Amino acid sequence: MKSALEIAQEAVLRPVIDVARDVGLEDDEVELFGRHRAKVLLSALGRLRDRPDGKLIITTAITPTKAGEGKTTTSVSLTQGLGRLGRRVVLCIREPSMGPVFGIKGGGTGGGYAQVVPMEDINLHLNGDFHAVQAAHNLLAAALDASIFHDNPLGIDPQTVTWPRTLDVNDRELRRTVVGLGGKSHGIPRENEFVITAASEIMAILALAADLPDLRARLGRVVVASTHDGEPVIADQLRVAGAMTVVMRDAIEPNLVQTLEHQPVFIHAGPFGNIAHANNSIIEDRIALKLADYVVTEAGFGSDLGFQKFCDIVCRLGGFVPSAGVLVTTVRATKSHGGMPFAELASEGLDALRRGVDNLEAHIGIIRRYGLPCVVSINNFPTDTEAELEVIHELAVGAGAETVVVNRGFAEGGKGAVDLAEAVISACDRSNTFHQLTPDGTTLRDQIDAIATMLYGADGVDYLPQAEADLARMDRLGFGTVPVCMAKTHLSLSHEPTWLNKPRGYRLPVRSVVPAAGAGFVVVLCGEMQRMPGFGRIPNFTEVDIGTDGRTVGLF
């Protein structure tokens, strides 16, 4: 089979203006970036405001292997399958970060014949949104240090600075740094850190802002440090939030591209799933829900991360009520949770499948805990045997799934996902009792405890001394009941990446709690979770190059 890049490069794309017209956008609501990508102006939402919303479908997954299990491929093929059934559908996804694109995971546009295109443009810069977020974030960092350097009029305590710098590249050497070296003319030395751009609070703000004035207000509320008296210092006090908003003026507009089968795709914002809130923008979802009968959106990593954050943060702030959840599982991931080594996952392992079912059962339970119908989609790999597919189907039904479908979208595109599309339509037609895990006004401790015990399966939570101090500070700042955004490994239901299947008999360690006042939540750091990834021994970038014809070659 051809590589994903070869399939994408050979695809015949429709002019994006035609894609926009077909979905119901007017020409003056679309700003073209060439023939095959565009931005959607926010004026479209005003025109469409009184239309009823379509059905909202969340795609999530079980705990993946380190290579991922095809959640984006499933989201794209489901969209293509709904299109083949004649349904008016829009796919909403996040923008890829170049960290994982050049790291272990590769691109974020699907694979095989279930792709979003033009995939090279999407995986590398797209329409500049990530650069705008990075520039706005670092402008705030520079303004903060400049204020301290120039006589410190706000009385900032340099030892309390919490605002890092950011870069959209995996670089572990930047996790802990020292800035301001070189003498008095070069700044005041202090410790600092970098986070990857997808983990920046500015990215979360972009994803959660309702419009441009709301973006401006949220940027102004960002907490960067404390004064010597212990009072918070925010971006508005540094008089930089207005300039940050100007930098991001175009970034707030969603991007429009298409699937290989020409269904419309909105792609906007890219907060990471394990260290941020893991979902695309509220603006993107709102426009899509007004245009389509069915909107497919994808939450980052497993249901313990992106799905939980979509339900408890995005739906709470955006006012969304989803209709169904699609849980992606694979034979190979289930075998991995059953103890089969990663290098052997291509071989048949029925016993390993049966041992690994607890992880699948836990994720089905998470979706149903939020009151939604659960459709299990088995993402078919060429190495899967018929016996394995039969066993995992049986296990999923036994674990509580209402519908189980084998999805062959990678190899067959929308044709291979028609069964999944029909199952999702049926699930959306059923009534549901969607609700958040905890009600509005729940304390941070109670929210953390509920997520840890009810979703992760922990026996309880242990707060390290820094976390205890942070929680007390959150109460003083008035953040004691805002939503929490858990930062933990995506490779386990627990905080420990080596603990597979469904870990039992442990307590969740919380090491710190970081305010994200502009985003409207606090970030809870569990275990050794880092907000700046590092490259592995053989990253994907070693395979990427420019061919003699000027086109990209290698892996995405």
Image (tube, rainbow, N blue to C red):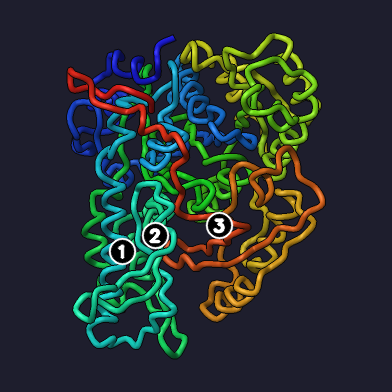
- Where 176 falls versus 84 (above or below)? below
Q: In the rendered image, which quarter contains the N terminus? A: top left
Circle 1 SS class: helix
Callout in the foreground (3, 2)? 2
Q: Position of residue 304 (x, y in %)?
A: 64, 45
- The disc label shown at residue 485, or none: 3
Write down the residue under mark 2. Answer: 194
Callout in the foreground (3, 1)? 3
User: Three-letter amino acid code at disc 3?
Assistant: Cys
Write down the residue under mark 1. Answer: 216
Q: CA distance from mark 3 to mark 2?
A: 19 Å
User: Three-letter amino acid code at disc 2?
Assistant: Phe
Look at the numbered discs 1 and 2 and tell me whether their residues touch, using CB distance below 8 Å. Answer: no
Circle 2 SS class: strand
- Mark positioned earlier in the residue sequence (3 or 2): 2
User: Three-letter amino acid code at disc 1?
Assistant: Arg
- Mark positioned earlier in the residue sequence (3 or 1): 1
- Mark positioned earlier in the residue sequence (1 or 2): 2
